Structures are given as structure tokens and as C-alpha cells.
Image (tube, rainbow, N blue to C red):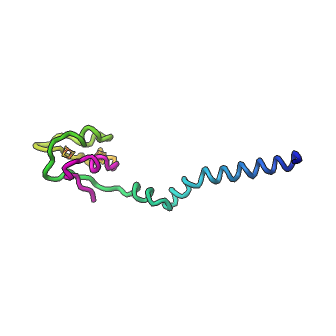
Amino acid sequence: MSDAGSNLTRRKFMIVGSVAAAAPFVMKMAGLVPEAKAADKQYTYTIGPGCLGCHYCFNECPGGAIHWGNSAYVIEHKKCLHCGTCYNVCNAGVVTRK
Ligand code: SF4
Ligand code: SF4
């Protein structure tokens, strides 16, 4: 292959590679990836009655938004990062989201 042909092939490869690398970000920004839509939804998480005080949510909360109330853990909504970790780790199923 000539130098010109080789350069053209290299340029095509770089363009295709760049488009392939950018595609997931573009799709995510455009809301075309289902998981992205779900992750973007900002649920409000609340600890309802029946908290066992097992500390799981408290230990796992990345925002430091969960603290001990009078007789159960409570979520301080101003600090909540909406990550859903408390909802997922609660064995008692008392963390609700809406
Ligand atoms: S959703 Fe995440 S940041 Fe908010 S209280 Fe639960 S674990 Fe903490
Ligand atoms: S994980 Fe559930 S039961 Fe345990 S402290 Fe948190 S809200 Fe209460």
C-alpha cells in the first residue's frame, strides 16, 4: 500500500475509533440507555416504621445522611445523594423510595 493509502486507512481507523468511544457517552446524554434513565431518577428515600437498628444502612451510606433518631435510624434528606444503597441493603425492607 502507498503512503497516501496507508495514511487514509489510519485516518479512517482513528475516526471510527473515536466515534465508537464516544457513542456510550452520547447515548447516555441523550437518555437512550435504559440504565441511565433509571439512574437519573432522583428518588426520595425514607426509613419507615420497623427499623431494626442493624446499622447496615448507616454503615454503607456514602453521604453520611443516616443517623440515629429517637428509636430508629432516619435519613437527613439534605445530605442524601440518592444512591439507593440504603434501599438495597435494608434486610427489613423498611426503606421506601418514591
Ligand atoms: S440513598 Fe444513598 S446517600 Fe441517600 S440516605 Fe440512602 S444510602 Fe445515604
Ligand atoms: S438497614 Fe434497615 S433495619 Fe437496618 S438500620 Fe437501616 S433502615 Fe433500619
Q: Is residue 94 magenta?
A: yes
> Which residue is situated farthest in the top direction here?
59
Instruction: Locate the C terminus and report the quarter of the image it occupies.
Output: bottom left
Q: Position of residue 62 (x, y in %)?
A: 32, 40
Pick the residue in front: 49 or 5.
5
Pick the residue in front: 20 or 83.
20
Q: Position of residue 26 (x, y in %)?
A: 56, 56
Q: Residue at x 75, y 52 (%)?
A: 12
**Does residue 71 appear left or right of residue 93 in this picture?**
left
Q: Position of residue 71 (x, y in %)?
A: 10, 43
Q: Residue at x 19, y 50 (%)?
A: 92
Q: Position of residue 21 (x, y in %)?
A: 61, 50
> Which residue is situated farthest in the front direction here?
1
- Image height of 19 relative to 71, above or below: below
Report the magenta residues as a range: 82-98
**Does residue 12 appear left or right of residue 43 in this picture?**
right
> Which residue is situated farthest in the right direction here?
2
